[in-house]
Amino acid sequence: MSDTRTKGTSIDVRADDPSREPWLSTLLRTLVYVVTAAVLAFPLAVPSGVFGALLGAGLGAIAGRLLAGTAARLHVIVLVSLASFGLAYLLADAFVASDAIADAIGPSWTLSLGDFLAFFGIVASVATALRAASVRHRVVAIVEAAVVALAFASLVVSHRNGAIHRPYAIADPILERGGDPTVAILVIGAMAAVVIGLLLLSEKSLLRSVVHVALVFAMLLLVLFTTHVAGLPPPPPSGDGLSLRDDTSQGGGGGGQGGQGNQQGGPDFQDEYDQSGAQTPVAVILLHDDYSPPGGTYYFRQDAFSRYNGRRLVGAQQRGIDEDVAPGYPSRSTPIPDSPETGAFRTTVETTVGMLADHPRPFGLESPIVFFPATNPDPARFRRVFRVRSASLTSDEWSLVGRRAGSPLWSPETIAHYTHGPDDPRYRALAEQIVAELPEEYREDPFAKALSITQWLGEHGTYSLRSRHAGATDPTADFLFGDVTGYCVHFAHATVFLMRSIGLPARVATGYLSSESGRRGGSAILLSGQNSHAWPEVYLEGVGWVVVDVMPERALDPPPGTPDEELQQLLAELLRGNRIIPDDGSEPPTPINEIARDLRTVGGRIVLSLLTLLFVLLYATKNWRYFAPMFATRQSAARLYLRSALDRLAEGGLVREDGESREAFAERMRARIPSLTPLSRWAEASKYGGKLPPDALSRVRGAYGAFERERARTVPWWRRALGLIDPFSWLRVK
Amino acid sequence: MDTDTDTTPGNAFAKAQAAQAAASASASDPTGSPLEKAGRVADRLRARLTAAVKGREDVIELLLVALLADGHVLLEDYPGSGKTTLARALGSAISESPGSTKHISAFRRIQFTPDLLPSDITGTNVMQLETSSFVFRRGPIFAHVVLADEINRTSPKVQAAMLEAMAEKQVTVDDETHRLDQLFFVIATQNPLDLAGTYPLPTPQLDRFLFKIAMKHITRDAELEVLAAYPKPHLDYAAEMPGVTRDEVLAARTALRQGVALDPAFREALVDLARSLRADKRVLQGASTRSLVLLLPALQARALLAGRDYVSPHDLEVLAPHVFGHRLEVAPGIDDIAAIVKEHTGREVEKLSRKALK
């Protein structure tokens, strides 16, 4: 039978016909290319390079569009483009390297021009290849959209180790002027959405464009809500050398640290101090009282180690010993036993700690008296928020001179515990030699003795993150009587052992330190991995544990850098909204922003579950339509198998046109997929009262088998695989 | 493809048909149901016409649909495009049934001119000297297949006589009615361009034609094939192929009306199509109810020709433009009637196609 319609001898080629793209769509796409190139090149290139990228993107997009309309084969276009990519790179390189050009036009012009050439060539070749591919194959439009999205995402990508999400270059100038960077970032996000939307809007069919825009909108909603529900990504796991955090990658791969002693914890000696987490922000501290430490350094104690295990100091795990360390996070106000009294030597300082990384226990400005739970103003950002009331030292070193060591309340066992050290006589010899240098009147004063030891170590020691003591039986002795080169753990142990050898009660504490200058005049302190520290402490009667830290005069490694001031301020602002949670469990009135947050959480869950439900339904229907023919009867077989076949074709993008009859569609497909004709015919026969052969079921099944084979030959495997995961394919079947 | 297979040898009707067919001189296959036989009649006719006329498969199909649906066609074409060959081939393919006493010519061509009179086509009563009585002498219209060439060149009076004959299958001369043959099939032609001194058929007259078929120039390959047959024309080759008898064609007409399944959905689709055409603002006068009635057997005939025993939406998609194209009067300034018909038909076909999967 012949049709009045021209016989379809090839599978639908209309979508690939470049001449069908309207000029407005071409213009829009070129514009999108130009904007994308500008966004990509902006942080990378000097102005001439950005201009080159702009020009390259525009010309490349037009060239790709024109080339796609010619008879040139796509892979030739792409290969030539890639070759010109390399050529442009080499040319720009040679241009910059050439002395003659530099002599002729001057070095700054040479560099500018070189940048221009490089960016122009690279962007133009990539744009040409991408555009041509996209015009020839509509699937590549996904790559186009992805490139655009990536370009914009690279602008606002998270940095600073994932602690905070804001682009440095965009947010900081706004913050400096007292603005809110969120607005700027939202504007950028909206621009990205508009640009991608433009790309998709320039579809040929209005319905498709509407569907695509709706999809983009749904994606934006999804991103908005999921970041809220799932939270921001945590800081990357990284070592802090002192095992202060929960998320550090210690344990199995802890290097020389080994598994022994992990039960008791405590800082162990390492040949190379694990510094991978140095830049990771771990906490932000808000000072609620005006307090400046006498030594100019804030110490935040997390843990204390006083039991000598024959090699180093580990956790005591004994009643009455080191009980001033918080047992865990407070769920109600938790007073700390054995905390020092305020008064002559100490003052009350209240601080809020917002932890950005997980820690096994809270830490507080030395020495904590009470821990209070506090509301978390931003659970997505802060792991834990609590308040600490500390009795912080106000007296300078001179006023502490004259206090006795230890406490009169201590039992002899406790005194023995805090003065137990290695049997090596060299410690005592060295300690006595150091003390002997003190002026006559201070030789018997415990604090003066302690200070003289730290001073001696400061003068003779060298700070280095790399040392070779971990292998020794007594690493401290190896350090102290060797090259005196090591890091905080070495210095702390050496100090404690020296002090203990002459009967001073001492211990090692770990936590974070921050110099007062880190505050920069504000009331917030940002702690990062590089602030982790171990230091020696000595007990003075009536004062409690006093930090006596060693400051090595020589250092092979640079001192910790200052924290990022903007980040510090921003996090402090975020943290400032917290309030203490009362012990009676009464809820404080919820502020409006928290209500909004809760609503967002609920909204996010609803959107997420609706979307999940939608996709589950889509996939369920898709699969049901796939498996339904198995249960077909003789009457329904033809219809169900035809539907299944049409689903498979739709997965490959082959669908019946509007107003086209099934037979005409089968006729159009006939050249490649002849089995569709009998399938369509039987289906229509069963619908419109035609007589079916008695063996209809097996014949339909046979035809469907043939159809699958023909489809496998016609549709490439990757297209079929993509179609398999497409939940919408069956919706396109009419 | 899907013809009836449950033929019982004891079927009396089939036996009778078989006997009749065996008696006939034509090379027909004696077995099969009436519908199968009708399918074979259609196939034989198509094979013969395709052999005779090259590059006109689509026109041949429409022509056969009209023949089997008992309608008439109007060809719009250029001189020398093969319409006479086509009509002659069709006429020569249909032979008188053996044993028939009537002698009606298989094919007659009437060239319509302005000075033609009705009696020139219908025939007239003449005085027979031997018996001194008037005897009716049949005009050229008494044939199986009549080619009414350039029907728009003759006067409305002749046109009216012709169209009456087409509609009623009878002619009236001097108050005496003479029945035309049951098969009577008219292929009228008109030149779409050369309109000087013509009497264009008004739309109500055009309504009597089932199809108006615009013949386009044939393809290069087909044209080469035509020339390749020189000096012996294709018609002569075709004459050697098996033909059909008049009775077979009439039986096929009956068989397809009874045997080809026509789902009620199509009746609804046709009515909806006509209504939506009438509702279209661009259309001044829509399709008549008669056209819908004529279309029903045409759909069945198209299905038969496509080897089906049921009417499918594709039949409607193919036939609707030819059926409605010449029946619509459109608003001034609109010239693409085919596009309008196609648009409305597409909507109905879409509805039908969607229902087919449910």
Image (tube, coloured by chain):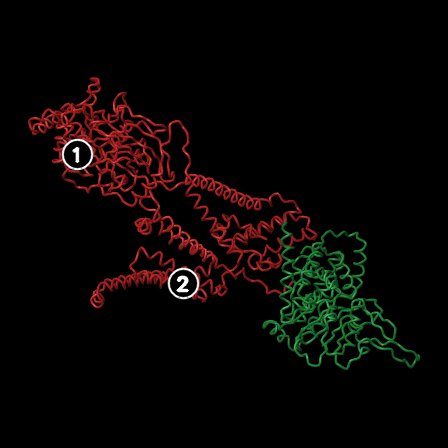
Chain colours: A red, B green
Please tell me whether residue B239 is drawn above or below residue B268 in the rendered image. below
Residue A350 in the image: state x and y as whole percent. Answer: 29, 33
Q: Chain of mark 2?
A: A
Give x and y (percent) for residue A581. 37, 31
- Pick the quarter of the image with the N terminus of chain B: bottom right
Q: Is residue A541 above or below residue A359?
A: above
Considering every residue shown, the one lying at the far right of the view is: B131
Q: Quadrant of residue A585?
A: top left
Image coordinates of residue A701 in percent, x first then y, are: 61, 48
Task: Say whether residue B333 is left or right of residue A556.
Answer: right
Q: Is residue B101 left or right of residue A6?
A: right
Distance, label 2 to label 1, CA atoms, is 64 Å
The numbered disc on residue A152 is none
Q: Earlier in the sequence, mark 2 or mark 1?
A: 2
* Cβ atoms at labels 2 and 1 below 8 Å apart: no
Q: Nearer the viewer, residue B59 or B333?
A: B333
- Identify the image quadrant of residue A195: bottom left
Residue A528 visible at all: no
Does dot 1 land on a helix, a strand or a loop? loop
Where is residue A103 drawn, in percent x and y? 20, 66
Q: Is residue A704 above or below residue A349?
A: below
Where is mark 2, residue-wise?
A61
Q: Amino acid at mark 2?
A: Ala
- Pointer 1: what residue? A550
Q: Crowdedness of circle 2 by 10 Å Cα count: few (<14), some, many (20+)?
A: many
Amino acid type, residue under disc 1 in the picture: Val
Relative to A558, is A215 above or below?
A: below
